[in-house]
Image (spheres, grey):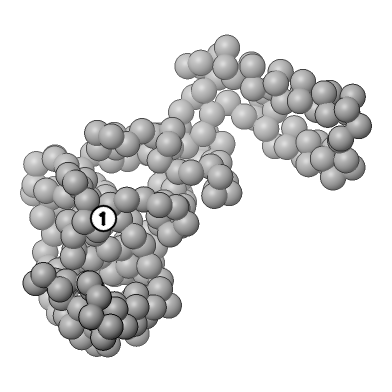
Amino acid sequence: MESISEIDAFMKSKSPRLPVYIELPERALLAGGALFVRLRTLDELEEFWLKHRDKFSFACEGKLYDQPSFLQEYEWVFGSTKVAVVRTVLRWGQSGIGCEFYDWAKLDPQMHEMFFLERDAHRDSMIQKGSWSEKDEADFQADSVRRSATTYRGWWRFCNLPSGYSASDWLNSDQGHEELIDPHMPYEKAATTLQEQTFDNWRQSDFGELESHNVESIDELIQYWKDERAEGEGYYGEEN
């Protein structure tokens, strides 16, 4: 397996464009421990995984999708870390996708102020209804300390996402991802945290064009398709 020390160095030779059209070297170990490979049949997938299962802890699979932005169907990125997988899928360093601190208080001061007014109003309303518990109050006080009008001015987010994806909707807040609200956080730390959160979000939500995996879910996926094939049902890569 060929070793490539720096994926960014490889990518800089290409012109910026949609990630899916930025070519990746196949079966070449990239910086950070990622590997891109096309696995067009179930036998290819199983053979590859039997050979490399002990090398990779995470993966991302391209799904059948109209006009994908990141991976085509049957394209996989395997990696030793979540960050390595996501950076490769996003073509970090060439596609233009990055992260930034969105200064909410400066760019939308009215909504920033409204957030705190509505938070206080909700507490007052629940107290009047007798529905405010001691735990609610403890959570409110803790949140008020962490997210005051002074400390909660904005958050780190992805920027320059492909058409059809918005920075505000990229991470599903319902999945419990921690907002990165420190404007002085080092860029690389913010980026790697957002990349890890992105991998987890792909695992937990219905992200149509991609599916991320850990070792156990790849094992389960292969067994599922083998069972489907044995029962005469449609299965992974049957058309190939």
In this rendering, would 93 be left or right of 126? left
Q: Position of residue 227 (x, y in %)?
A: 31, 83
Q: Against 186, is 153 above or below?
A: above
Above/below status of 142 relative to 114: below
Instruction: Give whichever of 47, 148 is nearer the camera.
Output: 47
- Residue ID at (11%, 48%): 21
Front in this rendered view, residue 136 or 19: 136
118 vs 206, left or right, is: right
Query: Can you tell which quarter of the image residue 231 is in?
Result: bottom left
Q: Is residue 28 left or right of residue 176?
A: left
Instruction: Describe the element under mark 1 as helix, strand or loop.
Output: helix
Query: On screen, 79 above or below 6?
Result: below
- Residue at the spot of label 1: 89
| Furthest residue in direction top, as rendered | 110
Image coordinates for residue 228, horizontal then vertical, percent: 29, 78
**Residue 194: where, in percent of width, then height?**
44, 48
Report the residue at 31% width, 63% height from top: 60
**Viewer can see residue 32:** no
Identify the residue at image location x=44%, y=52%. Answer: 205
State the residue in front, 208 or 177: 208
Q: Quadrant of the C terminus?
A: bottom left
Residue kind at label 1, given as amino acid type: Val
